[in-house]
Image: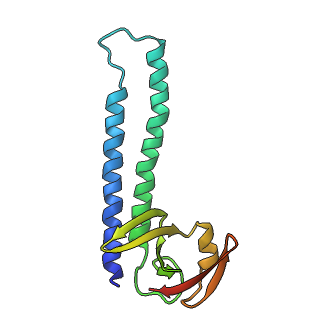
Amino acid sequence: MDKNLIKEELLKKEEKHIELSIKDYHDFLNQTEIKGDGVIDLDDHSHHFEAAALSKNLDKAIHNHEEHLAIIKAISFEPKTKVEPGAILSINGRCMIVAVSKPPFKIGDRDFIGISTNAPIYTELKGKKAGESFMFNNQKFNIDTVY
């Protein structure tokens, strides 16, 4: 398993998320701008304030993706023997990357899910090695491999 290739793919995915989030943010701002060429009533101001709150959420998404990008860049993806940041592990046949939280995604022909060190399951995984088991949400899991 080429972990550096996987890291590069994660970085590309995060950069694409940033690009799309910025585009969404700018598109939203352009659509909600109050034009000064007509009558502006209280509804217009109300919608503008509502839009401002939504634009903050879009801006926050950009910053979250930028933070994820920085975290991924800082993590060493060198081979690991225990679960720690940068480890790729297989649990009951499912591949996880310890870096940042990510919904299921595909790299090549493999499916992955990203977990952060803040994820509740990481507390149970931290420091464990291939062949070890752990309990999470009243279910037993086996760590098949750690890369």
User: Does residue 119 lie above or below 109 as drawn?
Assistant: above
Pick out the residue farthest to the top: 39
Report the coloring of the rendering. rainbow
Residue drawn at 37 percent across, 27 percent down: 32
User: Does residue 73 lie above or below 29 as drawn?
Assistant: below
Pick out the residue farthest to the right: 138
Front in this rendered view, residue 16 or 138 = 138
Residue drawn at 41 percent across, 69 percent down: 72
Instruction: Choose top left, top right, bottom left or bottom right for residue 24.
Output: top left
Residue 22, position as x, y percentages in the image: 33, 46
Q: Quadrant of the C terminus?
A: bottom left
User: Does residue 15 lie above or below 77 as drawn?
Assistant: above
Residue 73, position as x, y percentages in the image: 38, 70
Q: Quadrant of the N terminus?
A: bottom left
Front in this rendered view, residue 143 or 139 = 139
Instruction: Choose top left, top right, bottom left or bottom right for residue 67.
Output: bottom left
Residue 114, position as x, y percentages in the image: 47, 68
Counting the numbered discs, the total is 0
Residue 96, position as x, y percentages in the image: 47, 74
Instruction: Choose top left, top right, bottom left or bottom right for residue 134.
Output: bottom right
- On screen, residue 124 versus residue 23, left or right, reads right
